[in-house]
Image (spheres, grey):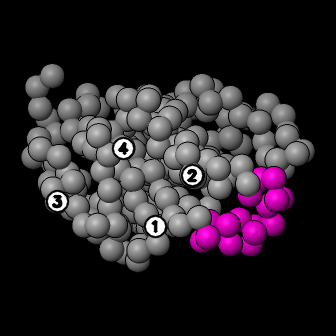
Amino acid sequence: MFFSEYLPKFLKVREQGFINVCKMSSVMIIVITGTPGTGKTTLAKALATRLDIEYISDKHIIDKYDLAEGFDNERNAAIIDEERFAQALEQETRDKNAVIDSHLSHFIDPAKVDLCIVTTCELGTLKKRLQLRDYSDQKIRENLDAQIFETCFFEAQELGHNVLEINTESQIDLLVEEILEEIKKQETTKNCDI
């Protein structure tokens, strides 16, 4: 049954909108991805706190596993190999429950993930948030384009994740409660036969 039958209007499930209830591991891994500035960190921290599980940021993984391969001065960002990043995430979360916050988190093996959440927001809101971060005009344009073309959503879907898209302009507490409801609905089928 598709989750879209249950979700309120501010949660949108697209095509593969199922929580991965049949994965082999007993740990819960939730990845929260999306264009920078769409509310990943706020949602990830709130969800991790509510679930009482570890919050893992991309910065933590990049520093701990020394993943920066250089620095892109034009974008003012570290250069990260997605495959090495995904391997480090898998190693970091091997035996623990976690909410992972990164615009690269969807590169982790979908078989190891319970739910992949892609955050979105209105373009005007996104532009203001990125301006507050002092992003260059070029970096703002690139991120707005990524949002317009739903880059993170389509990458996650292409990689085989079960994707839940969330507009974070609603109250975070309400979003967290709705995510928890969906997780709870699936608990009874988590140990299904494969």
Amino acid on which disc 2 is placed: Ile
Report x, y in % for residue 57: 58, 51
Q: Residue at x 74, y 72 (%)?
A: 132
Q: Nearer the viewer, mark 3 or mark 2?
A: 2
Range of residues picked out in magenta: 124-140
> How far is mark 1 from mark 3, CA to CA?
18 Å
Q: Residue at x 26, y 31 (%)?
A: 23
Query: Mark 4 and mark 2 in contact (Cβ < 8 Å)?
Result: no
Q: Secondary structure at mark 1?
A: loop
Tell me if 135 is positioned left or right of 44 in this view: right
Report x, y in % for residue 87: 55, 27
Amino acid on which disc 4 is placed: Val
Q: Residue at x 35, y 50 (%)?
A: 164
Q: Is residue 37 magenta?
A: no
> How far is mark 3 from mark 2, CA to CA?
26 Å
Q: Which residue is mark 3?
A: 6
Q: Which residue is mark 4?
A: 163
Q: Earlier in the sequence, mark 1 or mark 3?
A: 3
Q: Nearer the viewer, residue 177 or 17?
A: 17
Q: Nearer the viewer, residue 60 or 132?
A: 132
Question: How dense is the environment of label 4, judged by Cα within 10 Å: few (below 14), some, or many (20 and up)?
Answer: many
The image's mark for residue 168 is 1
Q: Which residue is mark 2?
A: 148
Q: Secondary structure at mark 3?
A: loop
In the rendered image, is residue 184 in sight?
no
Secondary structure character of the magenta stretch overall? helix
Amino acid on which disc 1 is placed: Thr
Q: Earlier in the sequence, mark 4 or mark 3?
A: 3
Q: Secondary structure at mark 2?
A: helix
Question: How dense is the environment of label 1, judged by Cα within 10 Å: few (below 14), some, or many (20 and up)?
Answer: many
